[in-house]
Image: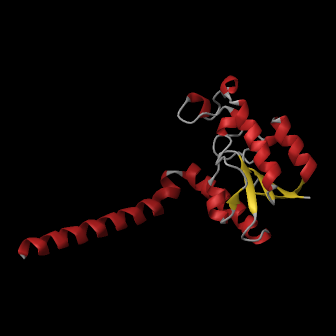
Amino acid sequence: MRTRCLLGRIALFLIVLGASTSVAVAMADRQVCPRSAWHQDHYQAVARYLREHTRPEARVFVWGNSPEIYLYAHRRMATRYISVNYQTGHVWGTPANDLGGHPDRKNVPAESWNNLMADLQRNLPEFIVDAAAGKLDKMDDEPLTRHPSIAAFVARHYRLDQTVLGVPLYRRK
């Protein structure tokens, strides 16, 4: 009986310790990682705009490496790709994905572009967010205007609706 009581107290202590550590880390994030806080502010502002200007069932597409926008906006992705690392050659875990790194374009699978464009044609998202043009998540040199197929698609089907903290938001015409 005593052992169970002691184990319960230890478990409770560990839960309280974990929760308080989590809260402390979250509160310190802005001081410890100001770049992360800057990104979070941008994700939240873009997501708020999308929530306010679309219906809950709307689909959106985020060009770049900022899938947090989908989460915060509570909107469905318009493609199978959570980011465009595969289309741009910014391969995770390699120097190509570092800020200022050199993308590995020669190893970009052609089918990734074909799949992306087919998904966009099929789903025609309400908004396309150019997170790369907004300098989010190490994609500063990859705005959608740099890639002919997505740039032509956006020009044909979308118009610039708003820029939120430097992030262009294109709305379907």
Q: Quadrant of residue 57?
A: bottom right
Residue farthest to the top, as pictured: 106
Q: Is residue 109 above or below residue 32?
A: above
Q: How is the image coloured?
A: secondary structure
Q: Is residue 126 above or below residue 96?
A: below
Relative image position of residue 20 (x, y in whole percent)? 35, 67
User: Which quarter of the figure is the C terminus placed in?
Assistant: bottom right
* Rendered-image quadrant of the N terminus: bottom left
Q: Is residue 95 left or right of residue 18?
A: right
Residue shown at 72%/44% (left/top)?
Answer: 132
What residue sits 65% from the left and 62% below the top? Answer: 44
- State the count of labels: 0
Viewer-side residue, 87 vs 120: 120
Q: Nearer the viewer, residue 172 or 12?
A: 172
Q: Is residue 153 left or right of residue 109?
A: right
- Indicate left or right for 83 with 60 as reference: left
* Residue 78 position within the rendered picture, expressed as x and y whole percent measured from the top left: 73, 54
Kindly identify the residue that appears in the image at 64 percent across and 34 percent down: 90
Question: Does residue 75 appear in the picture of this structure?
Answer: yes
Horizontal and vertical percent for residue 34? 56, 52
For the question of whether residue 141 can be seen, the reply is no
Front residue of this view, candidates 94 and 99: 94
For the point 68% across and 40% down, the residue is: 139
